Image (cartoon, helix red, strand yellow):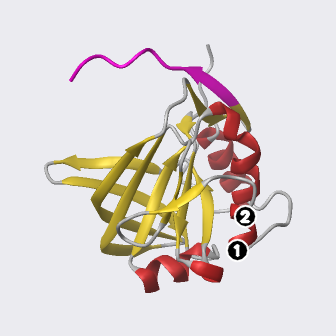
Amino acid sequence: MTMTLRQIPTDAQELATFKQAMRHLIGGVSVITAGSGEVRTGLTATSAISLSLDPPTMLICVNRDASAWPVIQRERHYCVNILDSRHQDLADRFAGRNGVNGAARFEGARWRQFATGAWGLEDALAVVDCAVEEIIERHSHGIIIGAVKSVHLGGGSEALVYGHGSYRALKLAPPKDL
Protein backbone atom coordinates (compact mmCIF):
# COMPACT_ATOMS: atom_id res chain seq x y z
CA MET A 1 0.00 0.00 0.00
CA THR A 2 1.34 3.39 -0.97
CA MET A 3 0.83 6.30 1.40
CA THR A 4 0.99 9.91 0.38
CA LEU A 5 1.80 12.46 3.03
CA ARG A 6 0.21 15.86 2.45
CA GLN A 7 0.95 19.16 4.11
CA ILE A 8 -1.61 21.09 6.17
CA PRO A 9 -4.33 22.37 3.78
CA THR A 10 -3.70 25.90 2.55
CA ASP A 11 -4.87 26.10 -1.07
CA ALA A 12 -8.02 24.90 -2.83
CA GLN A 13 -6.48 21.61 -3.94
CA GLU A 14 -5.24 20.75 -0.46
CA LEU A 15 -8.59 21.73 1.08
CA ALA A 16 -10.28 19.34 -1.36
CA THR A 17 -7.85 16.61 -0.27
CA PHE A 18 -8.67 17.31 3.38
CA LYS A 19 -12.40 17.12 2.61
CA GLN A 20 -11.86 13.82 0.81
CA ALA A 21 -9.95 12.46 3.81
CA MET A 22 -12.75 13.47 6.19
CA ARG A 23 -15.28 11.54 4.08
CA HIS A 24 -13.62 8.39 5.40
CA LEU A 25 -14.99 9.14 8.86
CA ILE A 26 -18.28 7.38 9.47
CA GLY A 27 -20.62 9.29 11.75
CA GLY A 28 -24.01 8.80 13.31
CA VAL A 29 -26.59 11.16 11.80
CA SER A 30 -28.53 13.50 14.07
CA VAL A 31 -30.86 16.39 13.50
CA ILE A 32 -30.07 19.27 15.85
CA THR A 33 -33.20 21.33 16.58
CA ALA A 34 -33.65 24.66 18.36
CA GLY A 35 -36.21 27.39 18.79
CA SER A 36 -39.97 27.33 19.11
CA GLY A 37 -43.04 28.33 17.11
CA GLU A 38 -42.25 29.79 13.70
CA VAL A 39 -38.60 30.26 14.62
CA ARG A 40 -38.08 26.51 15.01
CA THR A 41 -35.16 25.41 12.91
CA GLY A 42 -32.52 22.75 12.74
CA LEU A 43 -29.72 21.12 10.82
CA THR A 44 -28.38 17.68 10.02
CA ALA A 45 -25.10 16.84 11.73
CA THR A 46 -22.61 14.05 12.23
CA SER A 47 -20.80 16.08 14.87
CA ALA A 48 -22.83 15.35 18.01
CA ILE A 49 -21.06 13.45 20.76
CA SER A 50 -21.32 12.69 24.44
CA LEU A 51 -18.76 14.86 26.21
CA SER A 52 -19.28 13.69 29.79
CA LEU A 53 -21.40 11.26 31.76
CA ASP A 54 -20.87 13.06 35.07
CA PRO A 55 -22.46 15.50 34.65
CA PRO A 56 -24.31 14.41 31.48
CA THR A 57 -23.07 16.74 28.74
CA MET A 58 -23.31 16.79 24.93
CA LEU A 59 -21.09 18.58 22.42
CA ILE A 60 -22.20 19.66 18.95
CA CYS A 61 -20.41 21.59 16.21
CA VAL A 62 -22.46 24.00 14.11
CA ASN A 63 -21.39 26.02 11.09
CA ARG A 64 -21.83 29.70 11.95
CA ASP A 65 -23.46 30.25 8.55
CA ALA A 66 -26.25 27.76 9.39
CA SER A 67 -29.73 29.19 10.00
CA ALA A 68 -29.81 27.37 13.36
CA TRP A 69 -26.68 29.13 14.65
CA PRO A 70 -28.30 32.42 15.79
CA VAL A 71 -31.32 30.54 17.18
CA ILE A 72 -29.12 28.31 19.36
CA GLN A 73 -27.16 31.38 20.51
CA ARG A 74 -30.34 33.30 21.37
CA GLU A 75 -32.52 30.49 22.81
CA ARG A 76 -29.62 28.73 24.62
CA HIS A 77 -31.04 25.25 23.95
CA TYR A 78 -30.98 22.40 21.44
CA CYS A 79 -32.12 18.81 21.00
CA VAL A 80 -29.90 16.12 19.51
CA ASN A 81 -32.28 13.81 17.61
CA ILE A 82 -30.36 10.59 16.91
CA LEU A 83 -31.87 9.24 13.70
CA ASP A 84 -33.00 5.75 12.73
CA SER A 85 -32.38 4.59 9.15
CA ARG A 86 -36.04 5.26 8.28
CA HIS A 87 -35.35 9.00 8.81
CA GLN A 88 -33.14 9.52 5.75
CA ASP A 89 -35.67 11.87 4.12
CA LEU A 90 -35.78 13.92 7.32
CA ALA A 91 -31.97 14.09 7.38
CA ASP A 92 -32.00 15.37 3.79
CA ARG A 93 -34.69 17.95 4.61
CA PHE A 94 -32.74 19.34 7.59
CA ALA A 95 -29.57 19.33 5.48
CA GLY A 96 -31.34 21.72 3.11
CA ARG A 97 -31.28 19.33 0.16
CA ASN A 98 -34.85 20.05 -0.92
CA GLY A 99 -35.04 23.80 -0.31
CA VAL A 100 -37.34 23.59 2.74
CA ASN A 101 -36.36 25.99 5.55
CA GLY A 102 -37.25 26.88 9.13
CA ALA A 103 -40.40 25.50 10.74
CA ALA A 104 -41.46 23.84 7.45
CA ARG A 105 -38.68 21.28 7.98
CA PHE A 106 -40.69 19.87 10.90
CA GLU A 107 -43.76 18.99 8.80
CA GLY A 108 -44.70 15.35 8.29
CA ALA A 109 -43.12 14.01 11.50
CA ARG A 110 -44.19 13.74 15.15
CA TRP A 111 -42.42 16.26 17.38
CA ARG A 112 -42.82 17.27 20.99
CA GLN A 113 -41.44 20.12 23.03
CA PHE A 114 -38.93 19.20 25.74
CA ALA A 115 -37.93 20.82 29.05
CA THR A 116 -35.63 23.45 27.50
CA GLY A 117 -38.23 24.50 24.91
CA ALA A 118 -36.49 22.73 22.01
CA TRP A 119 -38.42 20.22 19.90
CA GLY A 120 -37.52 16.53 19.63
CA LEU A 121 -38.55 13.82 17.18
CA GLU A 122 -40.78 11.32 19.00
CA ASP A 123 -39.67 8.26 17.02
CA ALA A 124 -35.95 9.08 16.89
CA LEU A 125 -33.67 6.40 18.30
CA ALA A 126 -33.08 8.90 21.10
CA VAL A 127 -33.56 12.59 21.82
CA VAL A 128 -31.14 14.41 24.12
CA ASP A 129 -32.46 17.79 25.29
CA CYS A 130 -29.71 20.25 26.23
CA ALA A 131 -29.30 23.71 27.72
CA VAL A 132 -26.28 25.60 26.36
CA GLU A 133 -23.45 25.90 28.89
CA GLU A 134 -20.73 27.30 26.67
CA ILE A 135 -20.11 28.29 23.07
CA ILE A 136 -16.58 28.32 21.68
CA GLU A 137 -16.19 29.98 18.28
CA ARG A 138 -13.40 28.55 16.15
CA HIS A 139 -12.93 29.26 12.48
CA SER A 140 -16.17 28.49 10.55
CA HIS A 141 -17.91 26.66 13.42
CA GLY A 142 -19.19 27.01 16.94
CA ILE A 143 -18.44 24.26 19.43
CA ILE A 144 -21.49 24.13 21.66
CA ILE A 145 -21.41 22.39 25.02
CA GLY A 146 -24.79 21.57 26.50
CA ALA A 147 -26.00 20.27 29.87
CA VAL A 148 -28.38 17.35 29.35
CA LYS A 149 -31.79 18.21 30.79
CA SER A 150 -33.80 15.19 29.59
CA VAL A 151 -33.46 12.08 27.42
CA HIS A 152 -36.18 10.32 25.41
CA LEU A 153 -35.77 6.83 23.92
CA GLY A 154 -38.02 6.46 20.89
CA GLY A 155 -37.19 3.05 19.51
CA GLY A 156 -35.88 1.73 16.25
CA SER A 157 -33.25 -0.82 15.40
CA GLU A 158 -31.02 0.67 12.72
CA ALA A 159 -28.93 3.79 13.24
CA LEU A 160 -28.57 6.15 10.28
CA VAL A 161 -24.88 6.70 9.56
CA TYR A 162 -23.07 8.77 6.95
CA GLY A 163 -19.75 8.18 5.26
CA HIS A 164 -18.14 8.30 1.82
CA GLY A 165 -20.87 10.72 0.72
CA SER A 166 -23.90 8.54 1.43
CA TYR A 167 -26.23 7.28 4.13
CA ARG A 168 -26.22 3.71 5.40
CA ALA A 169 -28.10 1.73 8.02
CA LEU A 170 -26.22 0.23 10.95
CA LYS A 171 -28.07 -2.64 12.64
CA LEU A 172 -28.09 -2.16 16.40
CA ALA A 173 -27.77 -5.02 18.86
CA PRO A 174 -30.51 -5.25 21.51
CA PRO A 175 -29.54 -3.18 24.56
CA LYS A 176 -28.10 -5.00 27.56
CA ASP A 177 -29.65 -4.42 30.95
CA LEU A 178 -28.06 -1.49 32.73
- Determine if the magenta segment contains residue 35: no
As shown in the figure, which amino acid type bears the numbered disc 2?
Arg
Horizontal and vertical percent position of residue 57: 26, 55
* Residue type, mark 1 in image: Gly
Pointer 1 residue: 102
Q: Are marks 1 and 2 in contact (CB under 8 Å)?
A: yes
Q: Position of residue 34 (x, y in %)?
A: 51, 71
Looking at the rendered structure, the secondary structure element under dot 2 is: helix
Residue depicted at 45% across the width and 60% down the height: 79
Q: Disc count in the image?
A: 2
User: Element at badge 1?
Assistant: helix
Quadrant including the N terminus: top right
Indicate whether 130 appears above or below 108: below
Instruction: State the residue in front, 166 or 151.
Output: 151
- In the figure, is residue 19 to the left or right of 29? right
Residue 91 placed where, x, y %?
69, 49
| 47 over 1 or under it: above or below | below
Magenta stretch encompasses residue 177: yes
Q: Which residues are magenta?
A: 168-178
Foreground of the two, 74 or 12:
74
- Residue 156 point in image, percent of width and height: 55, 29
- Return the residue found at the far right: 98
Q: Where is mark 2, residue-wise?
A: 105
Q: Residues within 10 Å of mark 2 (few under 14, many from 20)?
A: many
What secondary structure do most residues of the magenta stretch adopt? loop
User: Which quarter of the figure has residue 39?
Assistant: bottom right
